[in-house]
Image (spheres, grey):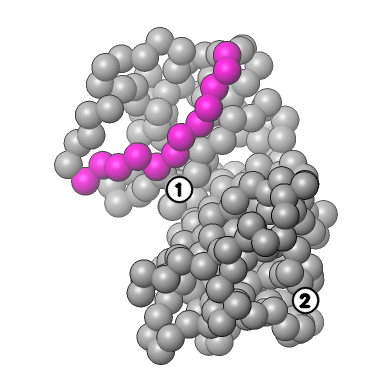
Amino acid sequence: MPLEQGEKINALLPIREFTENKFIFMATSAGTVKKTPLNEFERQRATGKIAIDLREGDTLVGVAVTDGQQNVLLFGSTGKAVCFNEADVRSMGRTASGVRGMRLQEGQKIISLIIATEGTVLNITENGYGKRTRLEEFTCHKRGGQGLIAIQTSERNGAVVGAVLVNDNDEIMLITDGGTLVRTRVDGISVVGRNTQGVTIIRLDKKEKVIGVDRIEGLVDEDDDESEVDDDRVLDADAVSNDDADSDDSGDNEIEEGGE
């Protein structure tokens, strides 16, 4: 696929067939979301097709195939998350800009899109802390709100750098800006409430930061000795919990669409 200067591949979606009841759901760093029928991408061009009209400075952070009725979670860099049903987002053409999914404060950005199916939500912060939280703790509201606390972004934790949906038999891969890659099992990470700081997932060197996390799908019969875990870098401890302090101001402002 030919890319323009500064452009990069952000997502890869395996598609078996282009059915009429499926959609491509997208989220951007500025909190914009968009839903487009899957069959609009059936006939490809050598140069690719426009999937979303991005505003200047905005970037695509997540893409998923949905059925039009699934619950969507957006996670912000300051530890907030919003949950809403995708039925709140009307279907629109490829060249549209989308609508507001989450209202962001200054300096905040969306870092992850999750389609709620089964499992727990794993949040990871730049200072190596994280936790798992059950999906049912993320109450769904109308799109456009400021969100609920998903993990505390204290001075200890730093900003959130990743949120992924995981199962107990999965593993995760963490990468730091120092070039360290650590693989660890999900079932060793505590499941705690939303409004907590989490536990130490990886020990970092001074000034080192976590910059990414990805899920490695596990196999039920996979042997324990196949897991490549750096025990010197990985640690789990009791979670630190505080009183719940949530906010969820809903908004319904729509972003102007581009030409079809």
Splitting the image into 4 quarters, where does residue 96 fall?
top left
- Residue at horizontal 31 percent and vertical 22 percent from the top: 48
Q: Is residue 174 left or right of residue 143?
A: left
Considering the numbered disc 2 on the image, is that residue within a helix, a strand or a loop?
loop
Residue most extreme to the left: 5
Q: Is residue 169 left or right of residue 23?
A: right
In the rendered structure, which amino acid carries the disc numbered 1? Val
| Whole-percent x, y for residue 237 in the image | 72, 83
- Residue at horizontal 69 percent and vertical 57 percent from the top: 121
Splitting the image into 4 quarters, where does residue 120 fall?
bottom right
Magenta segment: 6-17
Pointer 1 residue = 61
Pointer 2 residue = 244
Disc 1 versus disc 2: nearer the observer: 1
In the rendered structure, which amino acid carries the disc numbered 2? Asp
Which disc, if any, is residue 185? Answer: none
| Whole-percent x, y for residue 215 in the image | 59, 53
Splitting the image into 4 quarters, where does residue 207 fall?
bottom left
67 w.r.t. 218: above or below? above
77 w.r.t. 195: above or below? above
Q: Is residue 136 left or right of residue 164?
A: right
- In reply to whether residue 15 is colored magenta, the answer given is yes
N-term-proximal mark, 1 vs 2: 1
Q: Nearer the viewer, residue 66 or 128?
A: 128
